[in-house]
Amino acid sequence: MTSPPTPLPPPRGFTMMELATVGLIISILMAIALPNFLEAQIRARVTAAISDMATISAAIEEYYLSYRAYPPNRVAKTPEGGLVGDPNREDRKDRSNHGLRGGSLSILTTPLAILSLLPGDPFPTEDHGRHLFDYVNALEITGAPIPRARFGAIGSAAYLLASYAPDEDGDVYAAKMPPEGVGYSPTNGTRSDGDLILLGP
């Protein structure tokens, strides 16, 4: 005669204390990892902006070889004298008309297709519109190059390209010489003020 099978112990679930401990550990790990992840995203966008501005700069130099002049600052004038789509600071706060920011560089895509498409500025990120890099041809505005000393460098530059950078507040405007001290530096923190600027050539 066989003995009846030994009954299994009833299933035991997790206690509330165990679940709370696991939840606390996950929360702590997220609090450590999330800021680092967000900072990595900003650094990646900064790198992408620098790379895209270098691509545009190379196209500007190719344009110069063809026409012996850098692209003009404007494709059309506003009543205030600025570039269409690049309104003054007060108008820019609502970001309503930024599709044409840096629009004068469309000359690089047509009629001479140096670039098939102008790279977009990865900043700002709060809306889904496409933003272009701003462009200032200093030779057209002042007849003289930009002293690089204004941006902590040596020599002079004929033009500059600018990205909004992580503060997402543009300090460079088409057809105006930029003020001093507007350059972005990650040494002040990845979200520090200033625009990403590339001076060329």
Image: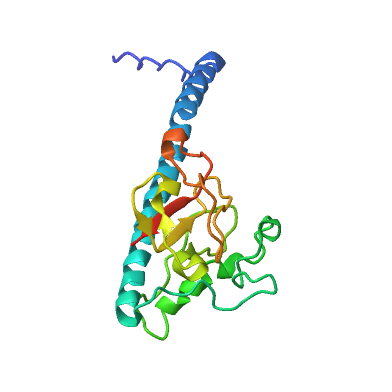
Q: Is residue 194 left or right of residue 36?
A: right
Residue 2 in which image quadrant: top left
Q: Is residue 166 left or right of residue 60?
A: right
Q: Residue at x 58, y 50 (%)?
A: 169
Q: Residue at x 35, y 76 (%)?
A: 63
Nearest the eye: 160 or 42: 160
- Residue 61 location, x and y as percent? 32, 70
Q: Residue at x 43, y 15 (%)?
A: 9
Which color scheme does this rendered protein use?
rainbow
- Residue 41 location, x and y as percent? 43, 44
Nearest the eye: 40 or 2: 40
Q: Is residue 201 above or below residue 116?
A: above
- Residue 40 location, x and y as percent? 40, 40
Residue 100 in which image quadrant: bottom right
Q: Residue at x 48, y 71 (%)?
A: 140
Nearest the eye: 197 or 11: 197
Specify whether residue 89 is in view: yes
Q: Is residue 97 left or right of residue 141?
A: right
Counting labels gives 0
Specify whether residue 41 is in view: no
Q: Which residue is situated farthest in the bottom direction here?
A: 111
Nearest the eye: 189 or 37: 189
- Residue 199 location, x and y as percent? 39, 57
Quadrant where the C terminus is found in the figure: bottom left
Quadrant where the N terminus is found in the figure: top left
